[in-house]
């Protein structure tokens, strides 16, 4: 090593002198941004090393910190998931309780407006098979339930009890192929409702000449001694002419939605067929704003028949019959008809009576020609 330095002593000294001069120049010289060159060199040489060191330090520190934090977050996440599941169960339970309360209130209101004695029951099961038309209810012989008792809901009839056990009973739906019940339409057409194993029932034994329209409501007739008269059955969906009886399909209204709570008719009482269909509900119409050209709010408070002109005429005829104790359709033969001369029909309607006037006014051409010929006034023959 010493011989090598002695051999290249001059070159080594020269290189050291040059390096010293470069260092002095770098210390004294500046670049165009007024930064010393020596500082630029130092920063350029140190920056990569500093980046590596800082990356290693930050990564290890962040890994340790995140590991501890994520460990705590995992535990907190499990607790939140458990709390969310618990809240979902409580929400579902409260919804079911609210739905049950609403159904119970509807059944209570229906019982209050029906003269028949009924027993509330809840469906707790169904018969074997996917399309079974048998339901199991939680009322039995210990509650007074007997075989062949009718089962209804506020929406319509459901079926009948086919088997009664001490704690529960089997109910046969009206869509079952072995079910049959006597029914009547609003117009008085009688028939037999039969199940077909499908969502629609068949209205049988309706003569070809009887008129039944699509959309007409069907009610129990009470002839089968199963359901009292006046309970809703369903709505006519299709009518096809055939011989000797029409082919009529009826949609049961009680089976349109989910069936959970029912009423078992313990003591049936016949009732009248309702005047309005079950789906009829009064509609509130507010008064128009002032200056819109609508009717006067004071006029809207006047009592009287509302609806179309036909409804007004119907109400007027009905009022005359009630005032004279005349019941349309139920009076025996030979009963004196009501006096319609006292009927108060709304003015302007087609059935409104016209004011009596002269048979032949003075301005009538026939009267003038008769008087000119020497005949009696009024166009009468001698």
Image (tube, helix red, strand yellow):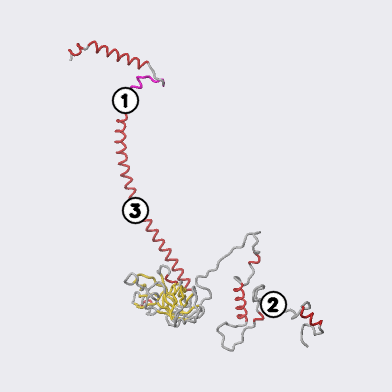
Is 201 included in the stretch rendered in magenta? Answer: no
* Residue range highlighted in magenta: 33-43
Picture residue at 30% right of the left edge, 36% below the top: 59
The first of marks 2 and 3 along the sequence is 3
SS of the residue under disc 3: helix
Q: Quadrant of residue 320?
A: bottom right
- In the image, residue 83 sits, relative to residue 307, either above or below, namely above
SS of the residue under disc 2: loop
Query: According to the image, label 1 marks what residue?
Result: 46
Can you give x and y, in whole percent of width and height, for residue 355 in the image? 71, 77
- In the image, residue 58 sits, relative to residue 72, either above or below, namely above
Can you give x and y, in whole percent of width and height, for residue 36 in the image? 38, 19
- In the image, residue 89 sits, relative to residue 369, either above or below, namely above
Q: Are marks 1 and 3 in contact (CB under 8 Å)?
A: no
Which quadrant, please, contains the C terminus? bottom right
**Label 2: how many residues lie within 10 Å, few (<14), some (14-19) or many (20+)?**
few
Q: CA distance from mark 2 to mark 1?
A: 116 Å
Residue 82: which numbered mark, if any?
3
Residue 354: which numbered mark, if any?
2
Can you give x and y, in whole percent of width and height, for residue 98 in the image? 43, 63
Can you give x and y, in whole percent of width and height, for residue 154 in the image? 46, 72
Foreground label between 2 and 3: 2
The first of marks 2 and 1 along the sequence is 1
Q: Quadrant of residue 259?
A: bottom left
Picture residue at 50% right of the left edge, 75% below the top: 213
């Amino acid at each position: 090593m010493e011989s090598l330095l002695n051999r290249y002593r001059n070159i080594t000294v020269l290189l050291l002198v040059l390096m010293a001069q470069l260092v002095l120049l770098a210390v004294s010289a500046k670049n165009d941004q007024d930064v010393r060159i020596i500082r630029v060199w130092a920063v350029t040489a140190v920056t990569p090393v500093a980046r590596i060191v800082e990356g290693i330090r930050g990564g290890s520190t962040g890994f340790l910190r995140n590991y501890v934090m994520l460990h705590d977050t995992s535990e907190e996440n499990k607790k939140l998931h458990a709390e969310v599941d618990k809240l979902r169960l409580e929400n579902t339970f409260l919804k079911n309780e609210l739905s049950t309360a609403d159904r119970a209130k509807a059944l209570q209101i229906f019982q209050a407006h029906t003269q028949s004695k009924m027993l509330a029951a809840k469906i707790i099961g169904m018969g074997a098979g996917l399309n079974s038309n048998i339901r199991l209810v939680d009322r039995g012989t210990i509650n007074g339930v007997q075989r062949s008792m009718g089962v209804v809901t506020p929406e319509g009839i459901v079926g009948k009890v086919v088997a009664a056990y001490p704690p529960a009973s089997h109910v046969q739906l009206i869509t079952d192929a072995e079910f049959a019940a006597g029914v009547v339409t609003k117009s008085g057409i009688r028939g037999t409702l039969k199940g077909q194993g499908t969502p629609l029932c068949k209205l049988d034994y309706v003569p070809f000449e009887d008129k039944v329209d699509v959309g007409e409501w069907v009610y129990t007739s009470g002839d089968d001694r199963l359901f009292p008269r006046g309970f809703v059955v369903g709505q006519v969906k299709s009518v096809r002419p055939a011989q000797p009886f029409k082919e009529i399909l009826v949609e049961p209204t009680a089976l349109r939605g989910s069936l959970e709570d029912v009423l078992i008719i313990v003591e049936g009482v016949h009732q009248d067929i309702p005047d309005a269909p079950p789906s009829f509900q009064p509609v509130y119409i507010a008064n128009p704003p002032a200056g819109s050209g609508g009717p006067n709010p004071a006029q809207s408070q006047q009592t009287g028949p509302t609806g179309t002109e036909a409804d007004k005429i119907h109400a007027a005829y009905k009022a005359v019959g009630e005032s004279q104790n005349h019941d349309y359709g139920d009076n025996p033969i030979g009963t004196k008809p009501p006096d319609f001369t006292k009927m108060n029909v709304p003015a302007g309607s087609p059935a409104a009576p016209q004011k009596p006037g002269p048979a032949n006014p003075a301005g009538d051409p026939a009267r003038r020609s008769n008087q000119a010929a020497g005949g009696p006034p009024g166009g009468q023959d001698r």
